[in-house]
Amino acid sequence: MSPLPSDRVRRAHARDTVQALLPSVQSRVAQSLGELEAEALVARIRQHLFDMVEPLQLLYGRTTDVAALTGRLLDLVVDAALERPPGLRRIDRRREVDPRWFQRSRVIGYVCYAGRFAGTLDGVRHKLDYLAELGVTYLHVMPLLKPREGANDGGYAVADYRQVDPRLGTMADLEALAADLHDRDMSLCVDLVLNHTAAEHPWALAARAGDPTYRRFYRVFPDRTAPDRYERTMPEVFPDTSPGSFTHVEGLGWVWTTFESFQWDLDWTNPDVFAAMLDTMLFVANRGVDVLRLDAAPFLWKREGTDGQNQPEVHLILQALRALVAVAAPGVVFKAEAIVSPDQLVTYLGAHEGFRPECDIAYNNQLMVMLWSSLASRDSRLATASLRRMREIPPGTAWVTYLRCHDDIGWAVSDEDAHRVGLDPAAHRSFLSDYFSGVHPGSFARGRVFQHNPRTGDRRISGTAAALCGLDAARETGDDEAVDIAVRRLVMLYSVVYSYGGIPLLYMGDELGLPNDPHWADDPEHVGDNRWMHRPPMDWAAAARRHDPATVEGRLFASLQSLARARAGLLALRAGTGTTLLDTASRHVLALRRRHPRGPAFVGLANFSDGPSEVGEDVLLPQFTARPELRLSSDGVRLTGPGVRLPAWGWAWLADH
Ligand code: OTU
């Protein structure tokens, strides 16, 4: 992986080759877009040239002429730049002026399935007022490109990247949705599955039909020898439904299938795959998508003797893609979906030796896991220890903070962090699975175990946020007090999600406390995948109660609205600066501080206890220049001089006066 002297020579040659092409690129672009655009494009190529050529050389230099490859990739990029609609080029220009637009505290995300939320993409366009009520400015519509027929892993088995799932609409509908969002200064995030295609994608069909070019798009082995060797160290993502990482395909051999057997892993060691996926990304970006969610990013490169994730080459691929896409679509943001250990996670944002822009935003799964861990154990010390240990991310990037998503929760508790606070890591992970599946005595949660792996003891968890907070159980028994407590827990958790720093994501239905979907298994394609429990259809009858403060929906909706409003007014909650975890005398209270050079200091407190907790002035006073004031809080919070008393599951946002 470290560059050879010949790498350096070839890289320099590739750069010289590209430099020599620039005058002709410039005149070609000038002809259709004018001199100014042409100059800007060439300036972007120059700016990103090193960041594309170096990774390409390291990835493909041993087998490919990188000068020719770079030229070929730049052709795709320039074509895409020429095809980029004028409206999107205008947005690009704004974002080149304000490249940190996604860090603003007004940015709040919402995640939904188009079909489950509003029937179709056109239906979603008619629900934008609803989202605006919640302060949403960023919409992640779950997989919407044309999937294979039958089971499709929630749309993550794509049969055609250039068509929308016909059940949801057309490409024109997607473009119309993007345009509507842009008119409201909202942005659109769409999934791009880079690691695998459906077994029915034309590339896979061609491979099956014996076309050698497409056969090389996938990783196919004649017998079990290599698969057996790889599987010795590879984790099983879906041990229940799709054990192992390979699938036997008649007439072809053993195909690498990390996820379901109908999801064929692409072979990124092949530069043709790189070119094809780059072209796909540019196509999707030109439809008006602002944020590309790069699904399963850690898995792109395989190496024997490893867990097949987070290989150095994965980062090189992302860096090269980042540099190339930035030339054609500078306003587009990459979001890493890397649900990995905290040490690995930060590297997707470029936080590693040899920093080079990579992804702009990434899911903070560590925060998510720690919120649930603190909730079950009524103890925030593990959260404080592990979040504190995370390496700081580059100032131009941001976390995506969230409580629930469409996937299960995997207990990413590192052994080191657990030991640090005196916990046995395996026992704690097991406790969390017991707790959230409701089998732990006294548990309020109504989740289910997802993909129990008896070999490792691993048990992940499904269930809606409300169900995991105790709302489903409380409603079953009609216990009003328990309902009230469950609502308090849910809002308290979201108060952290909205203040931790980064883009908070609201998962569809959490604003109404939607329960687990009791009918999740009715669809034969969903049987065996209980993640569908927490992907319920939107309950618009419940949504109609959102303005009634006497209802659960009314309380939750109003709370999330006020979190959004307060957040937008707090400069300290803008991303781009670090979050400091504070020590308090109470093991129940999670306390975080954020600062912005131009705004008042901020402290967020969350009480993970069934009883009241106090935070003293010794903790609070040093964080502020003047006396802190309460900006927003749950009911029942009392300022005790400069200290604060939080009721059970209470929370508070304090800022300099
Ligand atoms: C992602 O998740 C998606 O979010 C899932 O819904 C898909 O099933 C899957 O990819 C396949 O496309 O393992 O349990 O580190 O953890 O990509 C979910 C990333 C997953 C993986 C993640 C994956």
Image (tube, grey):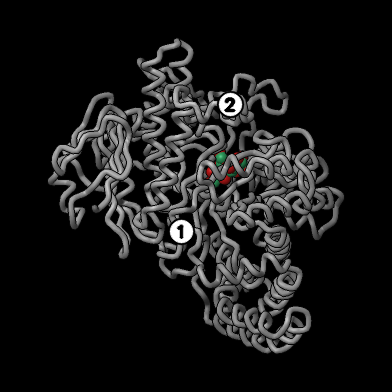
Q: Residue at x 53, y 38 (%)?
A: 507
- Per the image, the residue denoted by label 1 is 103
Observer-side mark, 1 or 2, equals 1
Image x and y of residue 196, in percent: 68, 49
Q: Badge 2, how many Cα within 10 Å: few under 14, some, many 20+?
A: many
Residue 496 horizontal side relative to residue 422, left or right: right
Kind of residue at badge 2: Met
Q: Position of residue 650 (x, y in %)?
A: 30, 32
Asked whether 655 or 243 is in front, the reply is 655
Q: Let me know if residue 86 appears in the view.
A: yes
Horizontal and vertical percent for residue 98? 50, 68
Name the quadrant containing residue 68: bottom right
Please name the residue shown 76% across and 69% down the image.
83
Residue ID at (67%, 52%): 180
Tag 1: Cα neighbours inside 10 Å, few (<14), some, or many (≥20)?
A: many
Q: CA distance from mark 1 to mark 2?
A: 32 Å
Q: Say how many tags the image has.
A: 2
Give me the disc on residue 57: none
**Can you tell which mark lies on residue 533?**
2
Seen as rendered, the residue at the extreme right is: 209
Q: Please say if 57 is above or below 611.
A: below
Q: Say if 336 sits above or below 317 in the image.
A: above
Q: Is mark 1 within 8 Å of ligand 1?
A: no
Amino acid at dot 1 = Gln
Mark nearer the N terminus (1 vs 2): 1
